[in-house]
Amino acid sequence: MTTIVPQDLDLLPTGQSLEDARAEGERAYELDRAHVFHSWSAQSQIDPRPILASEGSYVWDGTGNRLLDFASQLVNINIGHQHPKVIAAIQDQAAKLCTIAPQYANDARSEAARLIAERTPGDLNKVFFTNGGADANEHAIRMARHHTRRYKVLSRYRSYHGGTDTAINLTGDPRRWPNDYGNSGVVHFHGPFLYRSQFHAENEQQETERALAHLDQLIRFEGPDSFAAIILESVPGTAGVMVPTPGYLAGVREICDRYGIVYIADEVMAGFGRTGKWFAVEHFNVVPDLITFAKGVNSGYVPLGGIAISEKIAATFANRPFPGGLTYSGHPLATAAAVATINVMEDERIVENAARIGSEILGPGLRGLADRHPSIGEVRGLGVLWAIELVIDRATKEPLAPYGSSSPAMNEIIAACKAGGLLPMANFNRIHAVPPCTVTEAEVREGLAILDSVLDIADSHV
Ligand code: PLP
């Protein structure tokens, strides 16, 4: 569906003249700097370049340069930018019924819930809607606490679960550090990550066994009866795309069953096709008790998140109120976008595309880069969720940027990507290759070629 507008044309894909759009972009930038307070940043250190238009896998920046979106924005534009069917569904819903409170039945919300429930594994047949991923995790923890009547929660290091209070306390990476007020009842543990094994493991089997033994021991030391839930990204995303070692998630399921702990799979990033399956747990034949989702559920066209809930946990609240909710739970515009997105994903076989691109083009392409670039320490991923780790020494695995911060070399690489026509996603010493699930073979090759040229910068530090 992507029509590529050559750089020398004067029109954007919207039909707007580049000159008009540039003027709008400049005004947006000035007003942004005057009035917009941005996330996660010192306000004087950011440079929010305007985006004038977007289509498919591309965005156009404030000067009209076309950039390949290898970040899918924040890993949420799974069906690509500006899909006409989803735009039409939002417009139709707006004309019909823009908003209605959650206590009333609404066809968009009901149909979205049905489509989601039909795609989740096992008996996760009920859906609670939120506005995004963090509040989905907050409500999932609350649900588990009320279901078990226990308080503590297990969460792994190297994870991200959102920016709100409980969600940031769950998070197992440096984004938690400035927000950690110690009242959360969260106990962190190490998950499997063979490349930087905490368990001195030499192979995947050892990593799985030792990571599970560590989790089991930690639960016994903390008191098995005190844990309401474990929350686990099925494939941790921004924290590094560590695909779990074989048997690990099944082992977690067993531990949860043994101690009566609710297993919450955070699929906010990994869900809705990103790993080449509807949900990443399907790769591991595991059925959690709750799955939290957001991002890809409607490709971020309207804010939406939620929880898919097992029959057992839903039954807890059959005659007991669930003490939680949001004004915009299941908002008609957001759920209409979800219905259209899921239907588009089926019709255009987008999940299958993500799987094929990952196994045939993107994964092998990134491994090919590792053959040529000594700065690549490891390549890992599934579907269209990949990361490369940049190191200055393959033997010691010393990262190109320290854990928890950036480095001049990484900043130079990011700038070179943008100058070369690629919007990358970068975290510490990693570059993530996370294009839309609709990305074409040619687009992936274009992105790989740009990465190939900029990785010389990393190599010069080896
Ligand atoms: N969980 C995971 C795995 C995520 O990647 C994110 C966001 O990146 C969140 C939760 C938080 O989602 P949101 O930013 O929509 O609140």
Image: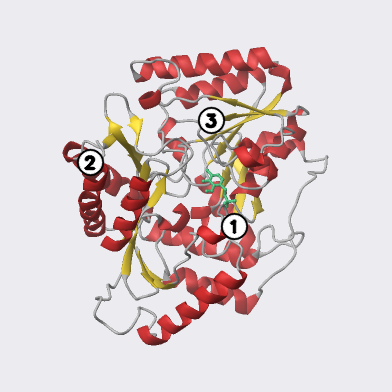
Q: In terms of sequence position, does the residue under pointer 1 or pointer 3 come before the other?
A: 3
Residue drawn 39% across the image and 85% down it:
16
- Residue, disc 3: 157
Q: Nearer the viewer, mark 2 or mark 1?
A: 2
Q: Secondary structure at mark 1?
A: loop
| Mark 2 beta carbon near ligand 1 (under 8 Å) | no
Q: Nearer the viewer, mark 1 or mark 3?
A: 3
Seen as rendered, the residue at the extreme right is: 320
Residue drawn 52% across the image and 13% down it:
213
Q: Residue 66 at x, y = what percent?
A: 31, 69
Residue 232 seen in the figure: yes
Q: Quadrant of the N terminus?
A: bottom left
When asked about the image quadrant of residue 169, the answer is top right
Q: Secondary structure at mark 3?
A: loop
Q: In terms of sequence position, does the residue under pointer 2 or pointer 1 come before the other?
A: 1
Q: Residue 18 at x, y = what percent?
A: 36, 83
Q: What is the number of callouts on the image?
A: 3
Taking the image as shown, residue 246 lies to the left or right of residue 95, namely left
* 255 vs 379, nearest the viewer: 379
- Residue, disc 2: 459
Question: How dense is the environment of label 3, judged by Cα within 10 Å: few (below 14), some, or many (20 and up)?
Answer: some
Residue drawn 41% across the image and 18% down it:
207
Per the model, the C-alpha gap separating discs 1 and 3 is 26 Å
Per the model, the C-alpha gap separating discs 2 and 1 is 41 Å
* 215 vs 46, nearest the viewer: 46
Question: How dense is the environment of label 1, judged by Cα within 10 Å: few (below 14), some, or many (20 and up)?
Answer: many
Taking the image as shown, residue 307 lies to the left or right of residue 120, namely right
Residue drawn 21% across the image and 42% down it:
369
Question: How dense is the environment of label 2, judged by Cα within 10 Å: few (below 14), some, or many (20 and up)?
Answer: some
- Residue, disc 1: 304
